[in-house]
Image (spheres, helix red, strand yellow):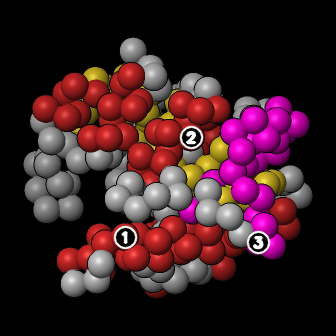
Amino acid sequence: MKLSGEALAGKNKVGIDPLTVKEIAEEIKDAYSTKVQIAIIVGGGNIWRGKSASEMGMERASADYMGMLATVMNALALQNALEILGVETRAMTSISMEAVAEPYIRRRAIRHLEKGRVVIFGGGTGNPYFSTDTTAALRAAEIGADAILMAKNLVDGVYDSDPMINPKATKYEDLTFLQLVNRDLKVMDSTAATLCMDNNIDVVVFNMNTKGNIKKAVEGQKIGTTVKGR
């Protein structure tokens, strides 16, 4: 599951809102009860956006590294909220910080999943110039995930234009990755889309703010928009 950093901010829109994180953790626990293996990529946009900082004149690589550290903070917040609810988790980071979380090792991550633990990936890919969408696609390919669930904040699928601006925007039920790229629909960046297409990974885009939607997505119920990897 790809979880945006903004989703953890709640109504504050910045920072980490404990009540919102608790509510998200409860939704994840509900999905976890179905006995599927769940790995989570968390963004950092509620704390820091590397691209925005770069546009302000900051050197891009440094700005991106700061964004990666923000994702680790979010991963730790989500990990603690889940463990309070009795869900065993492991936080793993692509940037070495052993005192904070386990270093990301593919085989170890797969073993955690096999043991029924929710694995939370922080630190992005560990390299600048890559988005957390690309991280989600990369980790999904590495662990052999069946699908990426893109839990969006207040958006219930993929539209032909921004539904917040255009009230007549049309929602897609199903798409291919070629359609996604050719129509410039901006669900994920082109690197992430190519990784998913090359590795036959479906992407389900849905509104995480609707109670029960994460579980429905995990169960394969038809919600949001499905981008077919096959």
Which is more toward the observer, 142 or 177?
142
Q: Mark 2 highlights which residue? A: 139
Q: How crowded is mark 1: few (under 14 residues within 10 Å), some or many (20 or more)?
A: some
Q: Distance between the residues labelled 3 and 2?
A: 20 Å
Task: Report x, y in % for residue 105.
Answer: 71, 45
Q: In which quarter of the image is residue 80?
A: bottom right
Q: Is mark 2 on a helix, strand or loop?
A: helix
Q: What element carries label 1?
A: helix
Q: How far apart are marks 1 and 3 (CA)?
A: 22 Å
Q: Is mark 3 on a helix, strand or loop?
A: loop
Identity of the residue drawn at 20% across and 35% down: 181
Task: Report x, y in % for residue 135.
Answer: 48, 48
The kind of residue tagged 2 is Arg
Residue at the top extreme of this rendering: 230
Residue 100, label in figure: 3
Which is more toward the observer, 229 or 107?
107
The kind of residue tagged 1 is Ala
Q: What stretch is highlighted in magenta?
A: 98-124
Q: Mark 1 highlights which residue? A: 61
Identity of the residue drawn at 37% across and 48% down: 156
- Locate the C terminus by quadrant: top left
Identity of the residue drawn at 14% across and 49% down: 161
Identity of the residue drawn at 13% across and 32% down: 182
